[in-house]
Image (spheres, rainbow, N blue to C red):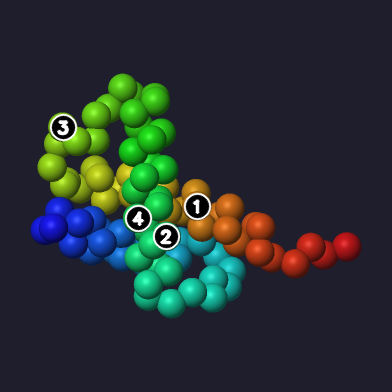
Amino acid sequence: MAGFIWWMIIGLVAGAIARFLVPGRQPMGIFMTMVLGMVGSLVAGFIASIIFKYDPSAQPVNAYGLIASTVGAVIVLGIYVSSTQPRVR
C-alpha cells in the first residue's frame, strides 16, 4: 500500500513538471495531473525496459525514476494536447 501511495506522489510531481514544460492550455485538475504522471511513469518504464533491458522492479524509487516519469508524462501530455486541440485550417 505504501508503494502505491509513493507512486501517486511521484506521479503528481512528474505530472506537474510535465504540465509546466509543455506549452499550451491543459484543462485538467490535480487528479488528472496525478494520473498523467502515473501513465508517464508506465510509458517511461516500458520504453526503458525495451531500450535498456531495464527491470523497473529491481530498483527502488530514485531520482532517475522521477526524471524518466517526467519525460514519459511529457510524451503522454504532448499526445493528449495534440489530439484535443482543434485543427486550424
Q: Earlier in the sequence, mark 3 or mark 1?
A: 3
Quadrant of the image occupied by residue 48: top left
Task: Give the alpha-carbon distance from disc 2 to disc 1, as whole Å.
Answer: 7 Å
Q: Earlier in the sequence, mark 2 or mark 1?
A: 2
Residue tagged 2: 36
> Neighbour class for label 2 at 10 Å: few (<14), some, many (≥20)?
many
| Disc 4 to disc 3: CB gap under 8 Å | no
Q: Earlier in the sequence, mark 4 or mark 1?
A: 4
* Type of amino acid at the residue the image marks with label 1: Val
Can residue 71 be seen in this snapshot? no
Q: x and y percent of residue 72 in the render?
A: 41, 47
Residue tagged 1: 76
Task: Give the alpha-carbon distance from disc 3 to disc 2, as whole Å.
Answer: 23 Å
7, 75: nearer the viewer: 7
Helix, strand or loop at disc 2? helix
Residue 28 as seen in the image, left or right of residue 85: left
* Type of amino acid at the residue the image marks with label 3: Ala
Residue in view at x 39 percent, y 62 percent: 35
| Disc 2 to disc 1: CB gap under 8 Å | yes
* Type of amino acid at the residue the image marks with label 2: Leu
User: The N terminus is located in which quarter?
Assistant: bottom left
Task: Give the alpha-carbon distance from disc 4 to disc 2, as whole Å.
Answer: 5 Å
> Neighbour class for label 1 at 10 Å: few (<14), some, many (≥20)?
many
Residue 83 as seen in the image, left or right of residue 55: right
Residue tagged 3: 58
Mark number displayed over residue 38: 4
